[in-house]
Image (cartoon, grey):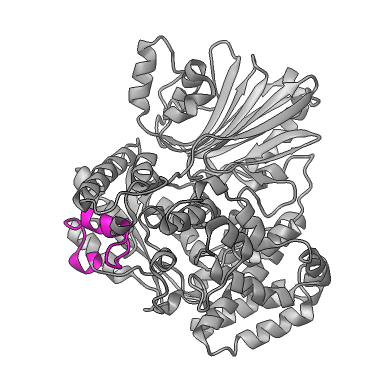
């Protein structure tokens, strides 16, 4: 697990200039790879490859970039490639030599044997940049679900890439600018797939590769999709569900066993949910020694799951590390630092909590944990999935305002795409409606011709949803947007790697995922019970109360729930949302925003109060991002 960055500018061929440009890009990724740093220059082509290493596998033999003996090929890899020993041995039997014994070393010989299709042989979470000097081409590759990030900028000065946007912004030819359209998308929480907060910087989509080729003295780029989360056109009805229960169990055991392999200890994140408890239960039986389990506890009973997590830890004999968080930890300097790492806004301080947790993991001398992300996406765990298939049940509770809309919303672009407007986007449509009156005149003018909700719909491949079951459509569209843009970004990699800690989401193993798409909807959600097939597969691993428990919102308590939290947020508002700064950033009308903030603290309706909290967080962070990246303000220290 590492940081990768670099650039290809055919006109920049002075080695000193290459080094001068690359070093700051590597410096800003030190948190992703504090153990080692490497670079490789193809001077005559203007190519620079950079790598910062977090050593997990092959501790003494994993230097990158990795080259072939003749120096014609070089690669940098961020992530983990599972089953590499078997692949390495098969390659050796076919006279393909791996340069080193790390998992990343299999990439070049696989490429030499299979060409671009080599990526289909890989299992794991990865972002890869490979330069082929003979063909004069460079390949950027991102894993199937986008667990590992990879961003790029392509323009007149060539191609620049990085594991995080901040490394691209350090390139001398790139001027940091917030994108107004992306700012609106962040206010409504839903980014357009492939976009970022910054002008001219794109995200390589999950399951995609970008191929850059030199044609004369100019670069040409082409993106290709090499994998997708594809549901069948139809499902069998009246099937025996026991076959699918066993199928999920077998594949999940294999996925967890695979992710326990490392040359350092591997722990588990443990909330009180079915997903992480299932992971811990399996890992406990797969491993000889007790598992270290890391749990977050909040100072609000309505949002805290730590009691159930504690009982799960006790039942498995896990050594539990409990981190209790209050407003002191969730706001102020930690909030600002989490925003800098996220490179986008987040609606809930769960991101800040995850930042604190990864810091605690490293303080306990752990570099890797297995996590439960992806289970809801595969097995229909979220309440909006159930609503899309089975209809409204009016039991939104604390989901209302943040995860479920209290009133049905429709949008023509989504109606045309899916035949309905997915429930997962409806609350964010309501947030957008709440935000629009607060925006500045230039942003209002932009929205006369730009429809953010429609833009998200247009980024979805129609062939992957048309004719599919409603549950499949809901799961697919969420996975192409919010899974990658939210859960795996500010809720995953960015907060984990902020403290040099690797997360391994076992549910997103592609063997598990590809099997999950074949499971009939009435086996995923059965008799109104979400994730029924997973519950049955794990029935003897989970405590009874957890097996029977409904989906719980893993969120940090919003600011309106506590006067002390309100005061902490108000302190940030007073600092970041001054008339001068709001005018400078240019996204909001200060008077209308100020009135909204004043009124928000007096709101008594819990649903609206949650929505107000979301707007506050996003507005604050857009101004923080401008200060941090455009103005270059220093980050505060965190105790």
Picture coordinates of residue 501, whole percent (x, y): 45, 47
Q: Position of residue 365 (x, y in %)?
A: 38, 48
Q: Residue 264: percent from the left, percent from the top?
A: 35, 39
Left or right placement of residue 131 versus residue 86 in this view: right
Residue occupying image coordinates x 59% and y 64%: 189
Q: Is residue 181 left or right of residue 358?
A: right
Left or right of 638 in this view: 248: left
| Quarter of image, res 514 | top left
Q: Residue furthest left?
A: 540
Res 7 seen here? no
Q: Is residue 516 above or below residue 610?
A: above
The magenta stretch spans which residues?
Answer: 524-547
Which residue corresponds to the image point at 41% horizontal and 67% vertical from the top-left?
554
Q: Is residue 459 above or below residue 44?
A: below
The residue closer to the viewer here, 563 or 236, is 236
Does residue 170 appear to the left or right of 401 in the view shown?
A: right
Name the residue located 79 percent from the left edge and 47 percent from the top edge: 175
């Amino acid at each position: 697990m590492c940081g990768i960055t670099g650039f290809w500018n055919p006109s920049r061929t002075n080695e000193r200039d290459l080094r001068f440009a690359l070093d700051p890009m590597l410096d800003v990724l030190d948190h992703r790879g504090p153990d080692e740093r490497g670079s490789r220059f193809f001077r005559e082509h203007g190519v620079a490859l950079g790598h910062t290493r977090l050593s997990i596998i092959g501790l003494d033999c994993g230097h990158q970039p990795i080259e072939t003996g003749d120096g014609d090929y070089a690669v940098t890899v961020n992530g983990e490639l599972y089953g590499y020993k078997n692949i390495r041995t098969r390659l050796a039997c076919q006279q393909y030599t791996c340069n080193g014994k790390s998992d990343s070393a299999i990439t070049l010989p696989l490429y030499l044997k299979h060409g671009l299709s080599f990526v289909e042989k890989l299992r794991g979470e990865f972002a890869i940049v490979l330069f082929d000097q003979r063909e004069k081409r460079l390949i950027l590759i991102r894993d199937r679900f986008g667990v590992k990030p990879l961003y790029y900028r392509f323009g007149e000065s060539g191609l620049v890439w990085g594991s995080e946007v901040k490394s691209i912004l350090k390139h001398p030819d790139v001027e940091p600018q917030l994108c107004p359209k992306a700012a609106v998308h962040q206010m409504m929480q839903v980014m357009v797939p492939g976009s970022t907060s910054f002008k001219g910087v794109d995200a390589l989509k999950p399951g995609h590769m970008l191929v850059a080729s030199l044609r004369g003295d100019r670069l040409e780029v082409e993106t290709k999709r090499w994998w997708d989360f594809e549901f069948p056109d139809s499902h069998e009805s009246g099937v025996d569900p026991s076959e699918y229960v066993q199928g999920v169990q077998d594949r999940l055991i294999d996925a967890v066993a695979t992710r326990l392999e490392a040359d350092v200890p591997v722990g588990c994140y443990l909330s009180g949910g079915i997903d992480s408890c299932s992971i811990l239960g399996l890992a406990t039986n797969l491993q000889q020694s007790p598992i270290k389990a890391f749990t977050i506890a909040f100072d609000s009973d309505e949002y805290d799951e730590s009691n159930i997590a504690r009982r799960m830890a006790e039942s498995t004999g896990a050594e539990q590390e409990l981190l209790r968080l209050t407003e002191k930890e969730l706001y102020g300097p930690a909030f600002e630092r989490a925003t800098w790492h996220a490179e986008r806004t987040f609606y809930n301080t769960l991101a800040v909590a995850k930042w604190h947790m990864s810091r605690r993991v490293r303080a306990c001398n752990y570099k890797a944990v297995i996590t439960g992300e992806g289970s809801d996406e595969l097995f229909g765990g979220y309440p909006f999935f159930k609503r899309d298939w089975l209809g409204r049940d009016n039991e939104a509770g604390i989901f209302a305002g943040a995860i479920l809309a209290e009133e049905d919303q429709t949008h023509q672009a989504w109606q045309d795409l899916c035949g309905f407007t997915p429930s997962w986007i409806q609350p964010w449509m309501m947030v957008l409606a709440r935000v629009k009156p607060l925006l500045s005149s230039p942003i209002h003018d932009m929205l006369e011709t730009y429809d953010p909700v429609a833009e998200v719909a247009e980024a979805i491949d129609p062939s992957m949803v048309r004719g599919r079951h409603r549950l499949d459509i809901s799961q697919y569209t969420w996975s192409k947007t919010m899974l990658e843009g939210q859960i795996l970004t500010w809720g995953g990699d960015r907060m984990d790697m902020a403290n040099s800690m690797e997360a391994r989401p076992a549910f997103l193993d592609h063997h598990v995922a590809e099997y999950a798409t074949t499971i009939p909807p009435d086996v995923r959600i059965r008799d109104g019970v979400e994730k029924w097939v997973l519950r049955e597969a794990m029935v003897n691993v989970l405590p009874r109360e957890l097996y029977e428990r409904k989906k719980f919102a893993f969120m940090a308590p919003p600011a309106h729930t506590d006067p002390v939290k309100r005061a902490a947020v108000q302190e940030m508002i007073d600092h970041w949302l001054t008339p001068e700064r709001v005018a400078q950033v240019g996204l909001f009308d200060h008077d209308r925003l100020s009135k909204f903030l004043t009124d928000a603290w007096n709101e008594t309706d819990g649903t609206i109060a949650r929505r107000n909290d979301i707007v506050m967080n996003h507005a604050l962070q857009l101004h923080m991002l401008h200060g941090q990246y455009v103005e270059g303000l220093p980050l505060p220290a965190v105790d």
